[in-house]
Amino acid sequence: MTRGTRWERRRYAFWAPLYDFVVWPLRKARRRSLDGLGLRAGERVLLVGAGTGEDLPFIPEGVFTVATDLTPAMLRRAWRKARDSHHLAVMDGHSLALRGSTFDAVVLHLILAVIPDPALCLADAVRVLRPGGRIAIFDKFVADGGNASLGRRLLNRVTRPIATDITRRLDDIIRDSQVRVRRVRNEPAIGGKFSIVQLRGE
């Protein structure tokens, strides 16, 4: 485990008891993102950075689910929301201990603005995705083609060490990935700072 990984694990172990309360206002957006995948019984879905399992209640019955997170303290809370078809495991989102081309869909909710190397995280998500599979992203990004404002960059000096980077651009993250953007939806109900993005693997 690298020094950076140890810090990430400690940081989110601290947040684990508070996490559900902090992200509760985002539940409807999470559900809309998952609904966009059109998951069907018999399919396999991977949740990277599953945290306390806030997405698990929205996975349809009969979908085989693997939920991963770097932080054991997060997954201990996720167990309370898991069903028999949900399998939880501690993994680093940069390098998933999973075979390639094994999942019909991958969910990246609130992970790409947190993980140290978001492009590497997305690349490994694509690796485990079956050809033509779907990826759901829900996170906070600077608008494509734009740059973070001075105020946002200054605020990021506070938010990044505590919890999340608010200056990342999705177009930078997906530029070298073997995916096609299917749909982008902004979430005006929470200030328009979050986006739901659907990608399709090649």
Image (cartoon, rainbow, N blue to C red):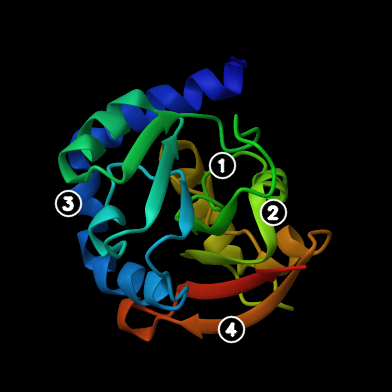
Q: Is residue 5 left or right of residue 61?
A: right
Question: Where residue 180 sits in the image (x, y, percent)?
Answer: 73, 74
Q: State the separation of the CA atoms marked 1 and 4.
A: 23 Å
Q: State the separation of the CA atoms marked 3 and 1.
A: 21 Å
- The amino acid type found where label 1 is placed reads Ile
Q: Tell me, for residue 115, which label it has, or none.
A: 1
Element on which disc 4 rests = strand
- The amino acid type found where label 4 is placed reads Arg
Q: Quick one: quadrant of the N terminus?
A: top right
- Please give the residue where the numbered disc 4 appears in the rendered image: 183
Nearest to N terminus: mark 1 or mark 4 = 1
- The amino acid type found where label 3 is placed reads Phe
Dot 1, how many residues are within 10 Å of its Cα: few (below 14), some (14-19), or many (20+)?
many
- Please give the residue where the numbered disc 3 appears in the rendered image: 21
Instruction: Name the mark nearer the viewer: 4 or 3.
Output: 4
Q: State the separation of the CA atoms marked 2 and 3.
A: 31 Å
Nearest to N terminus: mark 2 or mark 3 = 3
Q: Residue furthest front?
A: 42
Across the whole image, how many numbered discs are drawn on residues? 4
